[in-house]
Image (cartoon, helix red, strand yellow):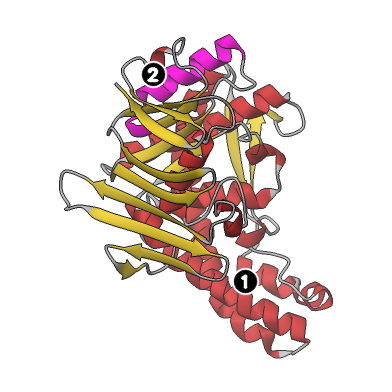
Amino acid sequence: MILKRLELTNFRCITQADIELDSGRNVIEGPNGAGKTSILEAVFLLGSGHSFKSSAMDALIQSSTSEFTVVGRFSDPVTSLITIGLRCSSNARETRINGEDAKGLASLAKIFPVQVIDPEIHQLLEDGPRRRRMFLDWGVFHVEQSFHESWRRFNRALKQRNAQLKSGKSNFGVWDIELAVHGLAVTQFRQMYIQSFAAFLTDVGRRLLRAEISIEYSQGWRKNIAFSEALTESRLRDQQRGTTTVGPHRADLVLKMEGNIAKDRVSRGQQKMLACCLILAQQLHRASLSTQSACLLLDDPAAELDVDNLGRLLDLVGELPVQLIATTVNSANLSLFKNAKKFHVEHGSVKAVA
């Protein structure tokens, strides 16, 4: 889906904005602290239900106001207009699609696949496994229709099993069958995805980092045994710790550069470029399997990147079949934005540039 119009009220430093976006490239210019990133944050919210900057939704409400609203109006060549609206106050939250209550956050992601590359993108490598699992599951969700149901049922069984373990009850094993069935399905979906995704990552790595990049999936339990067997082996330990210690919820991605594990061997700049490789490869992989348009948010790409790395990044971004919404202090020297639709933000006010 293409985001055609974005309407904001009392969101961060933006009191009111009504933005008509281009289906291709859009660039938002303005000084630091003007509200550029807040616009990207609002767009990301429409496709995910959460912010990429803050875990607290209250933090998105403009000071001295009681709530914010974000409304996105979407279209594509086949369907009629779709409207997503979010309203959040300190004690209530509403998410609606065409006026009806949204049925879970997955319904937003299905309509509007959106990803972001921001100055903190290196955290995809630096942070713990949970962030990398989220990255992986975003990709699987958008190419395999059956994945979400298996993921949902696995997480339901995991929650129930952990509750039984924490309570000290001995009948937690009743959830093992459900957990084993859907945990195996989640793992198989992820492994199949990695197999097809890896070639795209290799190609992007050669172009962006001029290095050989590879990826491996660590499944979350001991190799060469079934998940059901791993659950049986871990029962005593799980009882002692009050939580399930094996399974796809413990999985991770292992990235290698030139055959070496990358996490602890590369500089901050290389970490950022490697994380960009992951996002761009995922966009290319998804585009090869789906006709539905996606959106990429690019927040201040010049931050912390030298001229050569920035040039290679923008060249590859320019080839992606996505709706692009980017921010920058000054787009004059960035060729990617030469024919983009431009907006200027200052003091929380957004205006289209003729």
Q: Position of residue 157 (x, y in %)?
A: 57, 76
Q: Is residue 128 left or right of residue 13?
A: right
Local secondary structure at mark 2: helix
Helix, strand or loop at disc 1? helix
Q: Number of callouts in the render?
A: 2
Tell me: residue 15, above or below residue 250: above
Instruction: Pinpoint residue 134: horizontal percent, then vertical percent.
Output: 56, 51
x 50%, y 33%: residue: 36
Q: Which residue is mark 1?
A: 228
> Closer to the camera, 86 or 195?
86
Q: Is residue 9 left or right of residue 341?
A: right
Q: Nearer the viewer, residue 65 or 148?
A: 65
Determine which of the numbered discs, if any, sits on residue 337 in the image. Answer: 2
Task: Report the magenta residues as a range.
Answer: 306-324
Q: Is residue 144 visible?
A: no
Spatial CA span between label 1 and label 2: 52 Å
Q: Quadrant of residue 221?
A: bottom right
| Viewer-nearest residue: 286 or 72 | 72
Looking at the rendered structure, the kind of residue marked 1 is: Ser
53 or 157: nearer the viewer: 53
Disc ID at residue 297: none
Q: Left or right: 121 with respect to 260? A: left
Residue type marked 2? Phe
User: Residue 67 at x, y = what percent?
Assistant: 50, 60
**At 68% across and 72% down in the image, what residue appears?**
231
**Dominant secondary-structure state across the stretch colored magenta:** helix
Residue 349 visible in the picture: yes
